[in-house]
Image (cartoon, rainbow, N blue to C red):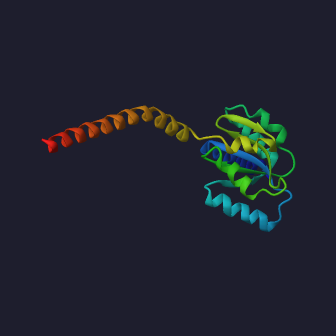
Amino acid sequence: MRKEDKNILINQISDTINEFGHFYIVDLTAMDAVATSKLRRLCFASDVKLMVVKNTLLHKALENLEQDFSPLYDSLKGSSAVMFSNSANMPAVVLKKIAKDGIPGLKAAYAEECCYVGADQLDTLISIKSKNELIGEIIGLLQSPAKNIISALQTGGDTIHGVLKALEERS
């Protein structure tokens, strides 16, 4: 492959990393064509982009970016594919759905500005909540006391209204 072609691929990988906030490096070596096709369909349905890359090109693309991806460099051995997503936990969910006996295997991941190395991190990655999910939970927690007060006031008002109506009917 010519150097110009490699540079184009490196720039494409860098642009894809910048486009998506999170990526997982996985090992698809032991997967046959049927299993790989099933994984690709599941990725497409889950808005996850799957790209098979050369380790050296991915390494150079990561070096070109401003963030420090050095913890991920040791996992760039053997056959690698990269799963890109805007949601931090969606590739982990996809891997968990399709994984059998550790295949496909998670090598490393970059999610929510943190590096995770090793297949044992899959459960941790599944439990990561996105920024929007956390904001929604915080808003729900903040609204809860106000809703309780309003509910109590409405219930109390209904009770007082009921007592007054009963007293009026007796008269």
Q: Is residue 28 above or below residue 149?
A: below
Q: Quadrant of residue 147?
A: top left
Instruction: Point out the image quarter for the C terminus.
Output: top left
Residue lying at 67% horizontally and 32% vertically, measured from the top left: 66
* Residue at (78% x, 56% y) in the render: 99
Q: Position of residue 19 (x, y in %)?
A: 60, 45
Location of residue 115 in the rendering, given as x and y in whole percent from the top left corner: 73, 36
Seen in the picture, residue 68 relative to 75 is either above or below; the reply is above
Percent across and percent down for residue 53 are 77, 51
Position of 167 with respect to 118 (left or right) is left
Task: Give the quarter of the image for residue 119.
Answer: top right
Q: Which of 43/142 is in front?
A: 142
Q: Is residue 14 visible in the rendered structure shown here?
A: no
Residue at point 65%, 40% (across, down)? 128
Instruction: Out of 82 and 154, give the one closest to the viewer.
Output: 154
Specify the farthest residue to the left: 171
Residue 168 position by quadrant = top left
Q: So how many labels did they put on this image?
A: 0
- Evaluate whether residue 87 shows in this view: yes
Q: Position of residue 70 (x, y in %)?
A: 78, 33
Q: What residue is shown at x 75% (from left), y 45% (from top)?
A: 122
Q: Residue furthest front?
A: 170
